[in-house]
Amino acid sequence: MENPKESLSALAKISDAFERSWSIGTDEIEERALFFCETDVKAAQLLATAAKAHGIEDKLLSEWAAAIPGSDALGLALRCDLKSVRLYTQYWVAIASRVESGDRSPFPLYRGFKSLPAGLVRRDDYICTPLAGPDVFWPPMAGCFAAMGLDHDQAQAVFNALSAETAIFTQTDGDGRKSWLTTVRRAQIDRTMLADWLAPLAKREGGSAIVKAAQTTDLVHVAGGMDSVKGAFLTFYFQSDAQTVIERLTAQDT
């Protein structure tokens, strides 16, 4: 079997983007590191190698491979304690083409193939509502923020620049998962305002890392909802780099 650390190093060399995320659940804050590549044969091979080195099942890997045609990007996410591995496909070009032709009907933006703790396997389709406005994306976001004890008025100020043009909104409603994910990169969320709003999370074990990320890196996505493993959850995704994600994923080796 491929050496897990070597597989990540090889993948990092050809990845186009990296993220770190923290998912706040009922019992814990789960830290993950993510790799993203444009779809091509080499990227698919290296993603598959890294996923297999970290224990993904052959059947799930084959299902992900079957979903690659028509995608424009591929991804891998690993819990930093290596207890889960997730592969993704993205179909942004397909959605953009549909919108340009006048079709704004919901369409999958991402598909996730997830090997989770305790042997659980799940497939999630993230259905995008093109050009969704605040009336669509804000109520579920605000509800999750409130459930985690984050101030509503501050949240409105932090995400004031989100609109149909700057937000990309998806929803997942499947077996074991009912959630939303909003890409906020285009809104260029102010780091200081974000960190101040997230400051209460520092009281939770592992929460101070989220506040530090908010102070030093750009927020890319926010997600939340109900998950069969985590219960109610809220996740923040921040831009990162190859060195940081590799260090986080191999920290247990030191």
Image: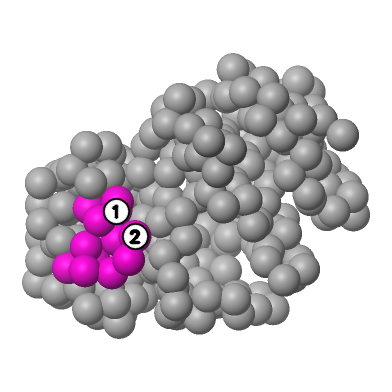
How far, Cα to Cα, is label 1 from label 2? 8 Å
Against 6, is 237 above or below? Answer: below
**With 183 as the anchor, is 195 left or right in this view?**
left
Type of amino acid at the residue the image marks with label 1 = Ile
Which quarter of the figure is the N terminus placed in?
top right
Residue 253 picture location, percent across and down: 58, 38
Whether residue 6 is visible here, answered yes or no, is: yes
Q: Provide the residue span drawn in magenta.
A: 200-211
Residue 171 picture location, percent across and down: 52, 67
Residue 135 picture location, percent across and down: 29, 72
Question: Which residue is pictured at 80% across the width and 42% down the height?
Answer: 52
Question: Which mark, by number, is residue 210?
Answer: 1
- Circles 1 and 2 in contact, beta carbons < 8 Å: yes
Neighbours of disc 2 within 10 Å: few (<14), some (14-19), many (20+):
some
Question: Which mark, by number, is residue 206?
Answer: 2
Q: Residue furthest top?
A: 13
**208 part of magenta stretch:** yes
Task: Pick the residue in front: 245 or 205.
Answer: 205
Type of amino acid at the residue the image marks with label 2 = Gly
Question: Which residue is pictured at 67% across the width and 66% down the height?
Answer: 117
Question: Which residue is pictured at 78% across the width and 39% down the height?
Answer: 53
